[in-house]
Amino acid sequence: QVQLVESGGGLVQAGGSLKLSCVVSGDTFSKFAMGWFRQEPGKEREFVASISWSGENAYYADSAKHRFTISRDNAKNTVYLQMNSLKPEDTADYYCALDGQPRPPGVRSGSYTYWGHGTQVTVAS
């Protein structure tokens, strides 16, 4: 059974940084792409970043480019999201996701099979 558990969220001042982690149980982690998404109350879940199984290729939403960095450590079954220069509009619940098929990282939530329960990020102005 595959489980994803996020951590690292919290309250931070605008301009600050947070690093989110997502630990994946099971032996499928290193074979598939991973993604981070976020969702504000009453809004649709939106793509933030994704990374290939090897970690060589990463993709970012325009809102995340030059501020956020996605990475992974396959030995630790963990994917990270380093978030710098945070803005109040980054406030949301952040979810990690694991693709269940061997393919390039997707930017749509429908590309991912397994999801964590989310970690809350609040950026105060």
Image (cartoon, helix red, strand yellow):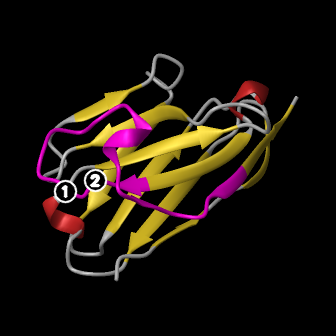
Q: Position of residue 21 (x, y in %)?
A: 49, 62
Q: Bounds of the magenta span?
A: 97-120
Q: Quadrant of the C terminus?
A: top right
Picture disc at residue 99? 2
Picture disc at residue 32? 1
Q: Is there CB contact under 8 Å for labels 2 and 1? A: yes
* Left or right, 91 with reference to 30: right
Nearer to me, 3 or 68: 3
- Sequence order check: which comes first, mark 2 or mark 1? 1
Q: Residue at x 13, y 44 (%)?
A: 103
Nearer to me, 87 or 94: 94
Q: Which SS does the magenta portion mostly show?
A: loop
Picture disc at residue 12? none
Q: Quadrant of the N terminus?
A: bottom left
Instruction: Report crowding for label 2: few under 14, some 14 to 19, many 20 or more residues within 10 A (C-alpha).
Output: many
**Three-letter code for the amino acid on which mark 2 is drawn:** Asp
Q: Is residue 120 above or below residue 111?
A: below
**Three-letter code for the amino acid on which mark 1 is drawn:** Phe
The part of the image, by quadrant, that contains residue 24 is bottom left
